[in-house]
Every structure is written in structure tokens, then in C-alpha cells.
Image (cartoon, grey):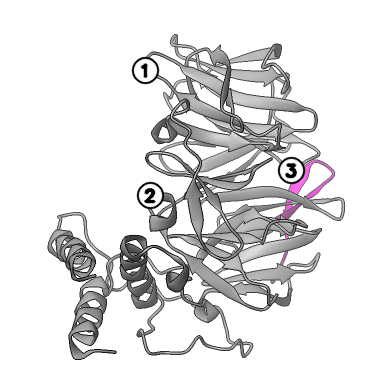
Amino acid sequence: MAQKDMMYLLFTFALAHAHGPPLAPTGIAVSNTPEDAPLALLTEGIAQRTDDPSEWRFLCPALWSGLPDAPLVSKTQSGVLVHGLTDAFLMRNDGTSSPMSQPEIGALRVIDTAGQGSAAVGLVREETQDALWRIDPPTRIQPLPGRTTSLIVHRDTLLVTSLDGEGNVLLLTLNPKDGAEIARNVWPIASSEIPEGRSDGQHAWLVRKTEDAERIERWGDAPKRSMAKSEGVISGPITTNEQVYVGLGQTLHRLVDGTWTAIDEAVAVDCLASADEQLLVCSGDRLLNVDALGQEVDVFFDAQTLLPPALERMPADLASDCEVEWYRALSDLGRSPDDSPLADTGREPSSEGCDGCSNADGASLTPALLLLFVGRARRRKR
């Protein structure tokens, strides 16, 4: 590597240091399918499994021209799409992407996605209302009442949470083929927060946020069965092997006779996911496969073993942007660009806080601008 290139690299890495929260898994976007590699969502970016089942590579946000956090992923008939700021991008198994040219939807306004294949649909925020769209090919199905928040597939239906403009929460059950309304529940609620719908495959749930807690309860207007409160984030619910699990705060619970029962000595829960009937728990910077008692069976994904993005397969401008994002991810992992990925040695999950996170007063603005400058300088040099 030329001395000037090395200076760019070290300068970029130094500016990226401690810019935000630690890089960690937040869930599963795509599980094992015959045609698509598994994807794990990260606090920034996505991890994609390579042809070697033990290896994962970093997919940088530049691949979908989007914000780094919480990308929306759709499994459509064309493949895996990630919705960016200007378009939807097809993710290839070799670590590259291509735009899908979906100006009809306007990816900037995609709120949520659900379903797979030809049945993949999205909530789209239009100028005057929200609407239900088919993602691939992009087709507007029908408008929806009020301001919407979440869209989930539950058995053979779609569930939408919405505000009706009069202070009521609408719980809509829709036909996934044409968006026709099957049922409507109206919940008066004092807060302007819209509950988020979730499904474990067997039951439908609502998660409601209040000022000091989150609550989970059964969908609909039935008595508040299986209700629970958590002072932390509620993860799940997830059904695996006919058991329903939820994370209340960082504690794993199982649904037993309609009651959430804590599982003693289970691993700490940052998020819940499932893949091939495995119960997966985000714990620090690892995604663990756990048994019915919440004990670690093996490591599904470890952010410390993350491999670099496939820069050599990308156009020069895209590779330059992606390289900067990779250095930033390495900084969050406490690794330097010259470090090799750490092999899994059965270490304890990291519980360190974000010692160097950017604060709310704008102190990280200058490093961010300098990162942008370095990326542009590298592109000009190329």
C-alpha cells in the first residue's frame, strides 16, 4: 500500500474512533433459504453469511444508499431487497448490490415491510395518507386510514396498527391479497403513541410504550390476557419448538398457561430472533443459539469475527464510501484495520458500555464532517 494511501487509511480510522454505539446484532433479516444467504441486522449495517457457514462479511450502508441503522429488508420474488433513501437495492450473495429502480414507491417513505416472495408488502407514507403497497413489482394496493406504525403477517392475514385522527387506535386485520379489511378493533388511548403489532406465529400481540415502561398484551379487544410490563425494551415474542418466548428487559420469559414466566439463569437478552427452529438471543456483540432453558448451545454469529466487505467487487466510488463505513465499524469493535478477525474462543459476551459515544450537544459533528471529507478525497484521488 502506498504511503499516501496508508495515511488516508489511518486518518480515516482515527476520525471514526468511538463515533457511536458498539457494533452488535439486533436481529435476523433473512434466515437460511436455498437461494439467499442469511443476514443478521446490526446496530449499523448488516452481516451476510459467506459460502463458509462459519464466516460473515460486513455489508455497509453505502450498498443501499441509506442510513446505517435499522434498514428495512424485504424477501421478495426478485431476492432480498434493502430499502434505502432513494430506492430499493437487491443484495447479492457475493456482498454487492444493485438498485431496483422503484420510483413508484419512493423508498424514503417506506415505514415497514412484511411477507415474502410475491406476497411481500410495505407500508408507504404518502403525502396525505399512508398506503399498502406490493413491493415487487411495486403496486399500490389501497390507502389506509390514519397514521400507521407497524405491519405484520399473522397466519393468513396482515395486521396494521394505526391512529384514526380522533385519538383512537385502530387495529386492522387485512386480507393480504387485496388489502380488504376483515376486522377492525378500536381502542381509546390517552397517549398519541401507536402500539406496535407483533406476532409469534401462534398469537398476535401489541407492545405499548409509556413514559417509564413498555407493555405487551394480546391483540384485540379481549380481556388483557398475558399482559406484562417491562422497564426495558420488550424483545419478541418468538415461537420455537411450540414454545413462546419474550424478553422483558434483559430477562428471558416463556409463556406458561397464559402467564409470562421468567427463566432463571438464562443468558441476558438484548433481542430475540429465530432461525430454523433455533431460538436466538442477542447478547452483547454475539447472536447465541440457546436451548429451552435459555442456556447457550453455540454461537450463531459473533461481530468480532466479522470479515471486511467485498470492496474489490464494487465500483470505485462505492468501494471508497464502503471502506470508510468499514473502518468506523472496526473502531466500534475495538479493532484496527490491520487486525485479523477474532476466532470464537468461548469468551464471555461483551457488556461494556459506550465509553466514547457521541453526545447530544453536537460534539461529534466535526469528526463526521471530516469522515465525509476523507471519503470524497479518496474518490477524487481514484
> Position of 197 compared to 84: left or right?
right
Q: Earlier in the sequence, mark 2 or mark 1?
A: 2
- Spatial CA distance of label 3 from label 1 is 33 Å
- Amino acid type at image mark 3: Asp
For marks 3 and 2 on the same chain, the one whose residue lies earlier in the sequence: 2
The disc placed on residue 65 is 2
Which residue matches tag 3?
200
**Residue 26 placement, left or right of 264:** left
- Does residue 224 sit above or below 39 in this rendering? above
Mark 2, Cα crowd under 10 Å, few <14 / some 14-19 / many 20+, is: some
Write the residue at 69% across / 19% down. 174
Q: Is residue 70 visible?
A: yes
Estimate the x, y position of residue 11 in percent, counting from the top left: 19, 79
Q: CA distance from mark 2 to mark 1?
A: 22 Å
Res 266 seen here: no
**Above/below status of 376 relative to 260:** below
> What kind of residue is marked 1?
Glu
Start-end of magenta stretch: 253-264
Q: CA distance from mark 3 to mark 2?
A: 31 Å
